[in-house]
Image (cartoon, rainbow, N blue to C red):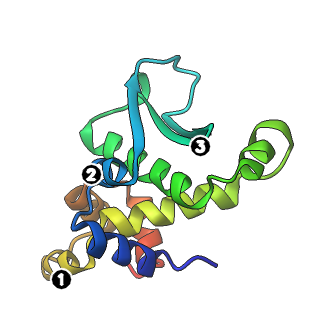
Amino acid sequence: MINFKVRVRNLVRKYHTRSPYKLCNELGIEIHECFLSENMPKGFFKKILGNKFIVINLTRVKDEYDKEFILAHELGHALYHSSSTAFFLHDHTFYQRGKFEVEANKFAAELLIDEKEIDKVCLYNMSIEQIGYYFGVPKELVSLKFNNFF
């Protein structure tokens, strides 16, 4: 089982940022933002000939916070699910993708929700929805980050 808390802490220490945009730049992962079909996912990661790409489907993005979450989620795939075997399983079999999606969400939660900031929101007795709004993430990420603490 991947310890995302430790992995993200190490990334933040090494690159001095929690920004998924800056991390992608530092890690050599190209970001492409384009308008695709409404039927396409909000974002996806692909590795082609050793080059890593994240594509953000602007047609389905609600706002800048949504885009940042999508990028953080796809960065999780780029870092932990980039093997060609995983993508073959995704694209060509009935393999359940749920585990990879949960892991990418856990990575995004650890990256986008800084624990040092949580004391501030706890002082105001905020709901899980309000905490999500404060950090600019879906409430489901707050639950993942704090293991249903709230």
Percent from the top left, x then y, of residue 107? 46, 65
Q: Are marks 3 and 2 in contact (CB under 8 Å)?
A: no
Neighbor class of circle 1 (other Cα within 10 Å; few <14, some 14-19, many 20+) is few
- Please name the residue shown 32% across and 46% down the image: 68
Observer-side mark, 2 or 1, equals: 2
Q: Dot 2: what SS?
A: helix
- Please name the residue shown 40% across and 29% down the image: 32
Q: CA distance from mark 3 to mark 2?
A: 20 Å
Residue 22, disc: 2
Percent from the top left, x then y, of residue 112? 31, 62
Percent from the top left, x then y, of residue 61? 37, 31
Question: Can residue 70 be seen in this snapshot?
Answer: yes
- Please name the residue shown 23% across and 63% down the image: 17
Q: Dot 3: what SS?
A: loop
Q: Earlier in the sequence, mark 3 or mark 1?
A: 3
Q: Where on the picture, by quarter, is residue 128?
A: bottom left
Residue 119, disc: 1
Q: Earlier in the sequence, mark 2 or mark 1?
A: 2
Give the amino acid at mark 2: Lys
Give the amino acid at mark 3: Gly
Observer-side mark, 3 or 1, equals: 3
- Please name the residue shown 26% across and 53% down the image: 136
Neighbor class of circle 3 (other Cα within 10 Å; few <14, some 14-19, many 20+) is few
Give the amino acid at mark 1: Asp
Neighbor class of circle 2 (other Cα within 10 Å; few <14, some 14-19, many 20+) is some
- Seen from the viewer's position, the closer of residues 114 and 78 is 78
Horizontal side of 73 relative to 21 (left or right) equals right
Residue that numbered label 3 is attached to: 50
| Rendered-image quadrant of the C terminus | bottom left
Percent from the top left, x then y, of residue 105? 50, 59
Q: Dot 1: what SS?
A: helix
